[in-house]
Image (tube, coloured by chain):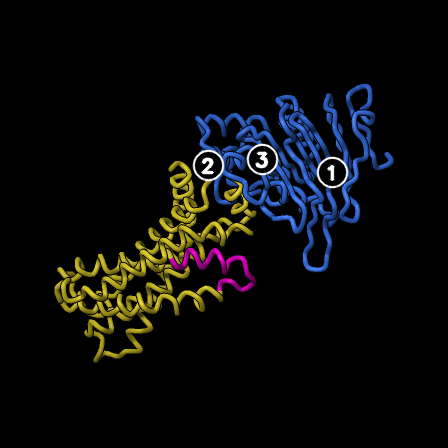
Chain colours: A blue, B yellow
Amino acid sequence: MPGPVVETRSLAKTYGPAVVLREVQLRLLAGAGAFIIGGNGAGKSTLLRILAGLEAPSDGQALVFGQDTRRLAARYRRRIGLMAHQSFLYPNLTARENLEFYAELYSLADPRACAHQWLGRVGLAEVADARVRAFSRGMEQRLSVARAMLAEPALLLLDEPFASLDHDGAEIVAALIRGAVERGACVLATTHGIPEIDGVELAVFEISRGRLMQHAHKEEVRRGGRIRSLLGR
Amino acid sequence: MSGFTAVLRKDLRLELRSGESTLALLALSMLVLVVLVFALGAARVRSVDAAAGALWVAMVFAGMLGANRALLAERDNGAIRGLLLSPLDPSTLYAAKLCAALIFMAVAEVGAVILMVLFFNLDFDASMARLAPILVLGAIGFSALATLLSAITGRTRGGDMLLPILAVPIFVPALIAGVKASAAALAGAPFESMGDWLKIMIAFDVLFVTAGYLLFEHVVGGE
């Protein structure tokens, strides 16, 4: 039986005297979808950056594919897709050029075809040759999701994927998350409120005062496959 | 190799599209040379020593601007994190960034040499061919140093100010060697006469290209 995709052991992160994460225990398997809720500054983004290997924990351990995230080799990094607050996109390149560039970095077989395919999936095919600097925040967000999912990562880390998106954009991203979970990827996303994603069982965690608590799992999924907001609505 | 070519091609595409770095480098080179021509006065304007000195001052200023800009694009929208998260080896990223900085600097050097010849009343003759390898060695060394240092200073507040403070003192040995070798080349001296200066420049290049290749991962790792 394969091990967990994500595992943290007593993970802690401090910035000077400020404790952002403390004693975080998290374990996610392949094909799992999970959302982390929490207020601004709760430590959600920090947790994702640590799991992506972009920040080192102050204490404890973060393991991805069984590897310590402080020393992730290229073959493991290529299996992680991260969509962060910053889009990682080049404003002076077009949407197509941005995706082609990342496709080349990941040595994908046909970068042009891959970029074309993903631009279609996120509904940006018509603006494929427009520079990203001319994009609205929502369009940039969609392109950023496409960039993160381009190489079909086994672990998808999404930092507030629904922020700035209109209804259509949110539907597109929800469908992509569902597709990723269905193909067996592990998806961990942060959000302020729980979105509705048909047909996906989502575990929900909350970060409060640096501690991660599991709120709910299958039982929160309604009969129709929709998950009810845990925020009292 | 595909990662190297992807990053280099992207950097060149961004530069061709905006022209910001090349234009700024050329403008800065011209400004430095004009100021020095007027500062030196008519009596020294045919001096190859003065011309070589002015050329290298222009090169160093232009090189700093170029190196800063080479990593600036990666800081927009946090793109450097996207690169670090990708399977791209940080050493390969350094090699691509060094290559891009070198190309920008080479373009600025060509412009600076033309301006130097015009402003210092020199001739386009065989001395230019002797000058070329010296400038190439200088550009490699300075690009290697400045690319590495700009990765450090770019992470700090006021990093643009910090880069010249760090880079110029470290570059001094290669700068002196470059000025001496260039003056000799412009005076028509044979290559053998500048052997020691060239050895210093080659040693500097080897040292900082190797240092950059080995250390870049640690320098950008905490972005």
What residue do we see at 78% from left, 24% from top? A226
Q: CA distance from mark 3 to mark 1?
A: 17 Å
Residue at which label 3 appears:
A81
Relative placement, left or right, of B111 versus A107 is left
Dominant secondary structure of the residues highlighted in magenta in the image: helix
Q: CA distance from mark 1 to mark 2?
A: 29 Å
Helix, strand or loop under label 1: strand
Marks 3 and 1 on same chain:
yes
Helix, strand or loop under label 2: helix
Residue at which label 2 appears:
A105
What residue do we see at 13% from left, 67% from top? B189
Q: CA distance from mark 3 to mark 2?
A: 13 Å
What residue do we see at 49% from left, 63% from top? B160
Q: In the image, what residue type sits under mark 1? A: Ile
- Pointer 2 chain: A
Residue range of the region highlighted in magenta in the rendering? B145-160
Q: In the image, what residue type sits under mark 3? A: Gly
Residue at which label 1 appears:
A36
A195 or A17: nearer the eye?
A17
B67 or A78: nearer the eye?
A78
- Pointer 3 chain: A
User: Can residue A196 be seen in the rendering of this structure?
Assistant: yes
Cβ atoms at labels 1 and 2 below 8 Å apart:
no
Q: Residue furthest top?
A: A223
B101 or A182: nearer the eye?
A182
Write down the quadrant of residue B6 in the picture: top left
Relative to B181, does residue A40 appear above or below in the rendering?
above
Helix, strand or loop under label 3: strand
Marks 1 and 2 on same chain:
yes
Q: Residue furthest right?
A: A232
Position of residue A191 measured from the top left corner of the image (x, y, whole percent): 73, 39
